[in-house]
Image (cartoon, rainbow, N blue to C red):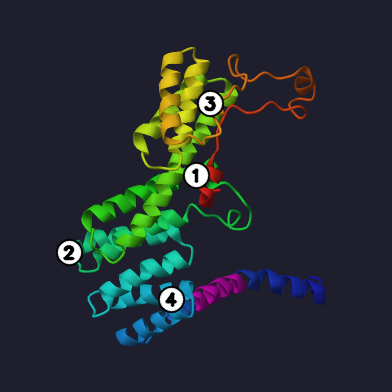
Amino acid sequence: MQNPTLPHLIALLVKKSLPFACILLISGCSFFGDKEEEQIGEGMIETELYEEASGLIEASQFSIAAQFLQALEAQFPFGLFAEQAQLDLIYAYFRGGQYDAATSTADRFIRLHPEHPDVDYAYYMRGLISFNQESSFIGNFLPLDVTKRDPGSARESFSYFSEFLARFPNSEYAPDSRKRMIYLRNMLARHEINVANYYFDRGAYLAATNRGRYVIESFQGSPAVPDGLAVMAQGYTLLGKPELAENSVAVLRENYPEHPALDAEGNLRDRDIAGGIQRSWLNRLTFGIVDQPEPLGFDTRELYNPEQQ
């Protein structure tokens, strides 16, 4: 039999040893991975863990702080700092941008400690978390109109703050919650006006009118109310209901005489709205780019609510 050559011997050795090398590699990765996880809080007593987490929060190292707080909870579930660690974990998740984890941690604290003297903080943080979800990375750098975005988080935040204030009207967090609720309420009202403007643009005059009426009925005192009245006046005019239109104009004239929907005599300004938006042949030819008609909608934030522009 012919003796194997050196290349043949090397190939055979590699073929035989490769499975064992893979097993060792996987085992090694597992070993080092477990070792790294064990290093978070390993060998530290409860006080040391909490002080380390608190220092990391002060240094704005929120993700690492959350890991130490989790380790504290796991190692000392009934310890001296266990409940405070759960509250701090809500904050660490929140500041670290982990909004879902922050909300679930707040929910868990409320469920486990409904009579805790600081449970109001957990209720408050749920509203604050949803409030901050209204912002996004892009929205922080570009001048986006938040009232034209999906109001789901705003409604959720408003609901959370409402529940918080109903339970804890004298909490130290109550004043801030009330201010945020006013902002959210105004934003939700303006969103309804934006929807009404959209319906006007699409020729859905009844739907637009209903949105204006909803603002009047549900958001009294909001800066969007003047536009709600203007929407109703214009909508009823387009629907061929002059008496209802005049009722809305009368209220608008009495309370907001400077509204741009009114002319110098206090009547609904003539915008050629009898037949809806009338597009010129040039506008149609250029697909709406040139000679754009004046939109039927309203936006008087510059006049009644400049801070929301």
| Distance from Cα at disc 1 to Cα at disc 2 | 43 Å
Q: Position of residue 5 (x, y in %)?
A: 82, 74
Q: Residues within 10 Å of mark 1 (few under 14, many from 20)?
A: some
Pointer 4: what residue? 65
Who is closer to the viewer here, 87 or 45?
Answer: 87
User: Which secondary structure type mostly characterizes the magenta part of the structure?
Assistant: helix
Q: Secondary structure at mark 1?
A: helix
Q: Nearer the viewer, mark 2 or mark 3?
A: 3
| Distance from Cα at disc 2 to Cα at disc 4 | 26 Å
- The magenta segment is 20-34
Does the CB distance between marks 1 and 3 fall below 8 Å?
no
Q: Secondary structure at mark 3?
A: loop
Q: Is residue 24 magenta?
A: yes
What's under tag 1, amino acid-wise?
A: Tyr
Does the CB distance between marks 2 and 4 fall below 8 Å?
no
Q: Nearer the viewer, mark 4 or mark 3?
A: 3
Pointer 1: what residue? 304
Pointer 2: what residue? 115
Q: Is residue 303 magenta?
A: no
Q: Is residue 251 above or below residue 240?
A: below
Name the image quarter holding the N terminus. Answer: bottom right
Q: Quadrant of residue 214?
A: top left
Q: Secondary structure at mark 2?
A: loop
Q: Earlier in the sequence, mark 1 or mark 4?
A: 4
Pointer 3: what residue? 265
